[in-house]
Image (cartoon, rainbow, N blue to C red):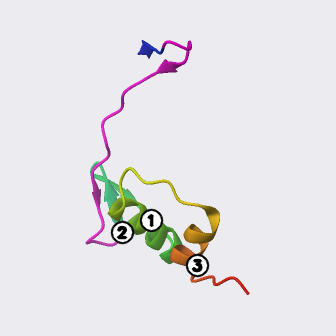
Amino acid sequence: MTQTSDGLMLSRLSAPVIDLSVYPQRVNGREVRLTPTELRLLRFLVEHPGHAFDQETLLREAWGWEPS
């Protein structure tokens, strides 16, 4: 654990290994059952590492929602 200049405590974690090519998915070798919506959301986030998204984008990508 490290402390930032503003006093926050941070812990570095290794990135999980996620296999999206099989069902049920496996994260670090453990079986994880995801709903189709959860899988779409996870896939979208994995395909765009390091990006932040607003609620509208996530709703559109995972649920197919379009604003009216």
Q: What distance separates the C-alpha of mark 1 from that of mark 2?
A: 5 Å
Residue 65's x, y, as percent? 63, 82
Residue at the right extreme of this rendering: 68
Report if the CB atoms under discs 1 and 2 are less than 8 Å apart: yes
| Quadrant placement of the C terminus | bottom right
Q: Is residue 56 left or right of residue 13?
A: right
Total number of numbered discs in the rendering: 3
Residue under label 3: 63
Q: Is residue 28 left or right of residue 35?
A: left
Q: Amino acid at mark 2?
A: Pro
Q: Main secondary structure of the magenta part?
A: loop
- Which is closer to the viewer, label 3 or label 1? 3
Q: Secondary structure at mark 1?
A: loop
Of callouts 1 and 2, which one flags the residue occurring earlier in the amino acid sequence? 2
Residue extent of the magenta highlight: 5-23
Residue under label 2: 24
Of callouts 2 and 3, which one flags the residue occurring earlier in the amino acid sequence? 2
Q: What distance separates the C-alpha of mark 3 from that of mark 1?
A: 18 Å
Q: Amino acid at mark 1?
A: Arg
Badge number at residue 33: 1
* Up-down relation of residue 50 to residue 55 (above or below): above
Q: Is residue 44 left or right of residue 28?
A: right
- Which is closer to the viewer, label 2 or label 3? 3
Neighbor class of circle 1 (other Cα within 10 Å; few <14, some 14-19, many 20+) is few
Neighbor class of circle 3 (other Cα within 10 Å; few <14, some 14-19, many 20+) is some
Badge number at residue 17: none
Q: Secondary structure at mark 3?
A: helix
Q: Residue at x 56, y 12 (%)?
A: 7
Choose top left, top right, bottom left or bottom right for residue 63: bottom right
Residue 3's x, y, as percent? 47, 12
Residue 22 in magenta stretch = yes
Residue 20's x, y, as percent? 30, 67
